[in-house]
Amino acid sequence: MPHPPASTPGKSASQTLAQVSLFAALPPTHRQAIERRCRWRTYKEDEQIIDRETDTQDVFFVVAGKARVVNYSPAGREVSFDEIGPGGCFGELASIDGQPRSAAVVAIRPTLAASLSAAVFREILESNPTVAQALLRRLAEVVRESTDRIMDLSTLGAHNRVYAELLREARDSDPTAFERITNQASIRPIPVHSDIAARVSTTRETVARVLGELARKGIVERESDALVLRDVARLTKMVREFRAD
């Protein structure tokens, strides 16, 4: 079971919501008032923050570190939905509709998170239209990304799902690369095979084979701290060709 967030005596310099996207448009005094209502806790690597199907309804805001949203198949295989870094949030669905948690969330590195009760979060949404609008934009992004992933699972084979995931991760890691005419992008840190496999519903061995094939074709190359996509256009074309089928 997840450990309840613990209140922290006083307030350290790191306990700020300044980088949390939902609160970016608020005046500092309004944001600081919300910070004082938060509970703050640092979670260890691999520590569970919330558990699927529980009735807890707190909303969490990642201040430092990273957390992964996951479910598990009946056979125990991990299915990864998202990774949430500094500035992101999770747990908002249960706070809005009062239903049990739809997924588990686990810290994948030491993670400082602030949390608010569902009642306080709803009060903030009602009294701050800019926060409510930011939440609507976030939920729209989640729906769009989920639609893309469903299309990938429905229309692409395992190899091509890996191609699509590499492009998705490159955009997240190196967004300006897709605005430049370089045809290259880098993924930092180097993605772990098992993490890619969990996101695209395949095996770690399949991911290793796909990356090996792409490396032999000169499309990807591993450097000391990054996986470099050397031919973004070719990889994009490979995905689109199979989607068209």
Image (cartoon, rainbow, N blue to C red):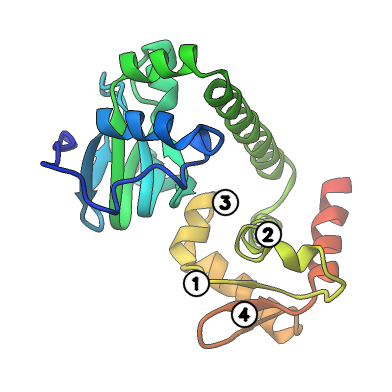
Q: Closer to the N terminus: mark 3 or mark 1? A: 1
Query: What SS does tag 4 mark?
Result: helix
Q: Quadrant of the N terminus?
A: top left
Residue type for callout 4: Gly
User: Quick check: marks 3 and 1 in contact, CB under 8 Å?
Assistant: no
Spatial distance from mark 3 to mark 2, Cα to Cα?
17 Å
Spatial distance from mark 2 to mark 1, Cα to Cα?
13 Å
Query: How packed is label 4: few (under 14 Cα within 10 Å), some, or many (20 or more)?
Result: some
Q: Closer to the N terminus: mark 1 or mark 4? A: 1
Which label sits in the foreground, 1 or 4? 1
Place residue 220 in its image quadrant: bottom right
Residue 52's x, y, as percent?
31, 30
Side of 56 relative to 87 (left or right): left
Side of 41 relative to 183 (left or right): left
User: Quick check: marks 4 and 3 in contact, CB under 8 Å?
Assistant: no
Which residue lies under the disc numbered 1? 189
Side of 14 relative to 236 (left or right): left
Residue 123's x, y, as percent?
39, 13
The disc label shown at residue 200, or none: 3
Residue type for callout 3: Val
Which residue lies under the disc numbered 2? 171
Which label sits in the foreground, 2 or 4? 2
Is residue 240 visible to us here? yes
